[in-house]
Image (spheres, rainbow, N blue to C red):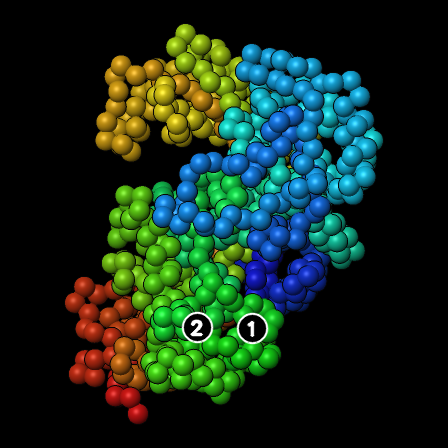
Amino acid sequence: MLLGVDVGGTFTDAVLLDDGHVHTAKVPSTPGDESRAVMAAVEAVLAGAGARPADVDVFAHGMTVGTNALLEERGARTALIATKGFADVLEIARQDRPSLYHLCAPKPAPLIAEGLKLEAAERIGPEGIVEPLADGEPERLAAALAEAGAESVAICLLFSYLDPTHERRLAAHLRERLPALHVSASHEVLPRFREYERASTTAIDAYLSPLLGRYLGRLEDATAAAGLPEPQVMLSSGGVAPATEAARAGAWSVLSGPAGGAVGAGLLARLSGDGNALGFDMGGTSCDVCMVEDGAVRRTDSRTIDGRPIQLPTVDVHTVGAGGGSIGWRDLGGALRVGPRSAGAVPGPACYGRGGTEPTVTDANLVLGNLAADSTLAGGVALDPKAAERAVGALGAELGLDPLETAAGIVRVANQEMVRALRVVTVERGVDPRRFALLPFGGAGPMHAAAIAEELGIDRLLCPRAGGVLSAFGLCASDRRRDTARTVMLSGPDLTAARIATEVRDLRATASRNHDVDGPKTADIARFSAHQQEGLGEARADVVYGMRYAGQAFELPIPGEPEPDPADLIACFEDAHEARYGHRDPDGEVVLVDIRLALIIDGPDPRPASANGSIEESSRKVRFANAWIDTPVLRGEPPANQSAEGPVIFELPESTLVLPPGWSASVDEFGTIVATRSATAGGAGDPGRTSPQFVREGSPAPPAARASEEE
C-alpha cells in the first residue's frame, strides 16, 4: 500500500493506493501545526479503505511549511558568517531591476538582522588561500553567535566552492561548540559559483531548517506512534527523501507541495494521453502550472521566491494567487480584482459558513450554479448559498453590478490570472500551448478548465478521477532522488573525457556519502522499491552539463551521459544554442561551467483502475455565458467507457468538472475523463442551439436539456 498526504493552504489531501484501487480523503488544514491535519487525513483514508497503519509500505508527504514560513518571514533567528568585508552580500545582491521604471521598488526584508552579520578574518581566491583563517577566529565567532542568541547560522565564504577548507573548519567547530545551533555551510548546500545566489540559498536553508526540523520531528513522532513508516518528504526537485534528511536541509523542500502535483501530472499525461500536457493545479489558495513534455516534468536550476533566489533544482512550476479561496475586491480605480489575498482554511469562503464574509471564487461558482447549493464538499464542508449571495452582492454594490454579473466577473478575472500563468510556461518560452492537453487538478481546477482551454486554443482536457487530490497521488509515484552540483570551468585542453568522468565520479561519491543513496541500503529504501523488484540495484545517475561560449553570462543545460565524449557534448551545446538563440559561433570557445548530477531510484509506477460503482444522475440550472441551461449532473466516479455531451457536470469525490456546450467526454481505463472540444461548437448558452445530452451505455438518453434566458 502506498500512502501520500499533501498539505495545502485550505485542505490536506490523502491518497491510498492498493493494487490500483484508489482511496481518497480530504480534511481542512490546520495552520500552526499542519501535522494534526496530516494525521487526521491518514486516519480518514485508512478508515475508508478498511486498512491499518501497519499495512502501509510507503508514506510520502508533501507540504507548504517551508514556503509559508519564507513568505511570512517567520523562520529561525539566523546569522551570516561571510569573508571580512563581504557581510552585505545579501543586501547588495545584483544590479538588475525587475521593474525598470520603478526605481524605488521595495525589496524583500532581509532574513539576516543587522546585528547578526558576522565577518571571518580569512580570504580564499580563485588560485587558493590568500589569507589563512586567523587563529582563534572559530572561537570568537562561536562566542558572538551564542551572545546574539542565534538559532541558526549560514556560512558563505568567498570561493568556498573551489576550496572549502575554511568553511569546514568553522562549521566543524560551531557544531561541536554549539550543538543546538543549526549550521548551513555553502560548500555543502550549493558548491557552485555566483556568490550572491550561493549566499541567498544558504541563508534560506539556515532560516528554514530549524522550523522544518521541529515540524517533521512532530510528524515523525505521530507517525511512529500510529505504526506508520517514516515519512518520505517530497523535495522541490520532484523526488522524495526520508524526513530525517529533509529536516536538515530546509532549502531543498521549499516547493515540496507543488512538486507532488507536477509528478502526478506527468504520470497521468503518460497513462491517459501522449505524454504532453499542461498541468494546472488550482487549490484553495493558489494556482500552480507546469509543462509535461514526453511524460517528463520540466525542471529548472533556480527559482526566485518573494524576490529571494534559490539556486537548487526544482520542478518548473509557476504560481499565481488565484484559487478557490481567492478574494474578489474593487481596486482604487474601480476595477474588479481577484487575489492574491485568500480566505484560506480559516475562515474560508463565505459559503463555508465559518465566519467568512468576503466574496471568493468558490462563492462566485456557487452563485453561477457550477456548484450545487445542497452539495457537501470534500472534507465535509456544507455550502451556504445565501451567504455566498450576500458576499458577492456586497461587492457588486461597490462595483455597480448585479450579483450574477459580479459572480461571472470574478470567475473571468480569476481565469485570466491562470491563463497568464500558463502563457508564462508556454508562449513566453516559444512553446505553442495548442499542441498540449490541459490537465486540470486540485479541488477547483476542473471547474475552470474548459474556459481556460478555450482561451488558449486547447481542444483536449484530461481530468483525473482523483483530480482533487492529484498532488497526494503524485507523492505515491515519486522517485527517490538526490541532487548535487559542482562548478568546474573546463575549456580547451582541460575539457577531456577523463577529466569529466573524474568530476562525475567525485560528484556521485559526494551524493552517496551525504545522502546514503548508493551506500548501505536502509530498510525504508528497500520498502520503497520492494513492490517493483527483488532487491534494490544501483541508483541511476542523471547528469546535466551547464555549458556556454566563453564570455557569455549564462549557461544552457545539456543532458548527457556520465562519461561523455567532449566533442559530442560541444555539438549538443551548439545545436541547443542555435535552437534557443538562432545562431552558433563556429570560432567560439565552449566552456563547461558546471556539472549537475542526480542519483535516482525509480519510484512506484501506480496504474489506477477505473471505478466500479454507479453514479447518480440529476440536473440543475447552470449559468453559461448569458443564459441559464438545465444541465445534466453526474455525481460519483464514472466507470470506463462512459461518455457524455456538454453541457454536463461531473461531480467527482474531490472536485467538479464543468463542461459547457460544445464539449464531449469519455472515461478511459484509468478513470480519467478525456474531454474534447468541437471545432464547430455553438456559443455557450445559445438558446437556439440543441443542448447536448448525457449518454450511458445500455440506457436511453434523457430528454434534451432546456435553455432559457435569465429568469
Res. 265 in view: no
Eyeballing the image, is 411 above or below 80? below
| Sequence-earlier tag: 2 or 1 | 2
Name the image quarter holding residue 206: top right
Kindly identify which residue carries mark 2: 329
> x%, y% of residue 465?
45, 63
Residue 348: give its label.
Answer: 1
Q: Amino acid at mark 2?
A: Trp
- In the picture, measured across the screen, residue 450 lies left or right of residue 691, that is right
> x%, y% of residue 14?
59, 60
Q: Residue at x 62, y 13 (%)?
A: 130
Eyeballing the image, is 205 above or below 325? above
Q: Residue at x 57, y 65 (%)?
A: 11
Q: Secondary structure at mark 2?
A: strand
> Which residue is more in the foreground, 399 or 465?
399
Mark 1 is surrounded, within 10 Å at the Cα level, by few (under 14), some (14 to 19) or many (20 or more) other residues, namely: many
Res. 181 in view: yes
Eyeballing the image, is 119 above or below 102? above
> Which residue is more in the foreground, 548 or 676?
548
- In the picture, measured across the screen, residue 254 lies left or right of residue 631, that is right
> x%, y% of residue 299?
44, 40
Residue pushed farthest top? 493
Residue 264: give its label.
Answer: none
> x%, y% of residue 539?
56, 30
Q: Amino acid at mark 1?
A: Gly
Determine whether label 2 and label 1 are within 8 Å by CB: no
Eyeballing the image, is 173 above or below 497? below
Residue pushed farthest front? 104
Q: Secondary structure at mark 1?
A: loop
Name the image quarter holding residue 72: bottom right
